[in-house]
Image (cartoon, rainbow, N blue to C red):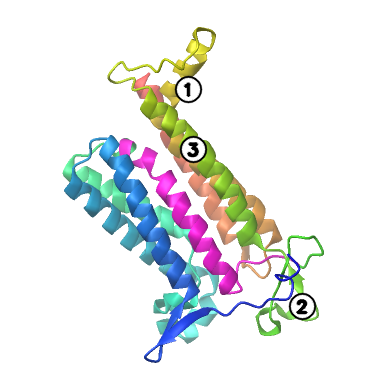
Amino acid sequence: MDFLYHFIPNKVMFSIFNINIYWYGFFIFCGAILGFLIFYKLAKKEKIQEKDIYDIFFYCFLFGIIGARLGYFFYDIQYYMQDPLAIFRFWEGGMSIIFGIISGVITLYIICKRRKIEFAKILNILPIPMLVAQILGRLGNYFNQELFGIPTSFFLKIPIQENLRPEQYKNETFFTPLFLYEIIFNIILLIILSLLLRKKYKNNLENGIISKELKAKDFRKSMNLLAFIDKGGIILIYINYYFILRFILEFFRIGEPKVLFLTLNQLLSIIVLVIFNIFWFRKNEKRA
């Protein structure tokens, strides 16, 4: 741990033929590959056709990345107005996961609508590959020396090089690694959702398959849980957990533009939480 207190990472992983390969891009790439493999396996279990699996992942990932990068424009409007082409230099870092999630989900909805695929079924398996990609992507934030918060003396701290420190904290050395907190809480969420999805696949309510592991005294509780998962419980937990987490972490960020005492991410989090929960509960009221 002492090593990390003095180590300043280099954002360039290596160079080949005068072309820099960045850690940030490397982790995004790894997240995409791992995310696809997990999505493919889960989509197969949901009996989605192979061509649709490839197309869904490709277009959702593509427009998710584009949305995440273009959305970052709103976080530093003055900088991107002075240098508009900088928005296309995504390897330098700077993506809004919230805008990425929104654009990815809109893309998914359009594809499902056109191909008559059950939107809710795909939406309910997305959090697992998305969390894996998010966790790996956040590692890239470390090498880019970004997504850090207020100065701290707590043992979970990282040094930030002087030219990247906010003006009011030039004399500070150690800052809160918000990306690390997000990684930790995302790992916890990934474990919880993976266990729930595993329970769903071991007990297929649609085909009347019930696992022998279910104890008689817990049968009603287990059946209620399985019904909740089938209704889209995985995506409901993910959206509420992740966006509440982001809302809380934003209080520790530095220099974020604010509207009505809240950062842009906090406002977006509230909007997403309200809209999604209304949509989810209304949809399931109709099913009931």
Label placed on residue 193: 3
For the residues labelled 3 and 1, say whether their Cβ atoms are less than 8 Å apart: no
Q: Is residue 260 visible?
A: no
Asked whether 172 or 111 is in front, the reply is 172
Sequence-wise, the earlier of marks 1 and 2 is 2
Main SS category, magenta section:
helix
Task: Identify the residue at horizontal 34%, vertical 47% (top origin).
Answer: 39
Q: Is residue 221 above or below residue 110?
A: above
Label placed on residue 47: none
Q: Say few, some or many: other residues with alpha carbon within 10 Å of mark 3 (under 14 / 14 to 19 / 20 or more).
A: many
Q: Which residues are magenta?
A: 121-150
Task: Identify the residue at horizontal 37%, vertical 40% (top origin).
Answer: 125
Q: Say few, some or many: other residues with alpha carbon within 10 Å of mark 2 (under 14 / 14 to 19 / 20 or more).
A: few
Horizontal side, residue 141 vs residue 227: left or right? right
Q: Secondary structure at mark 2?
A: helix
Q: CA distance from mark 3 to mark 1?
A: 12 Å
For the residues labelled 3 and 2, say whether their Cβ atoms are less than 8 Å apart: no
Write down the residue under mark 2: 168
Horizontal side, residue 127 vs residue 250: left or right? left
Q: CA distance from mark 3 to mark 2?
A: 41 Å
Q: Is residue 99 above or below residue 73?
A: above
Q: Is residue 9 magenta?
A: no
Q: Is residue 139 magenta?
A: yes
- The amino acid sitting under disc 1 is Leu
Q: Secondary structure at mark 1?
A: helix
Q: Is residue 273 above or below residue 167?
A: above
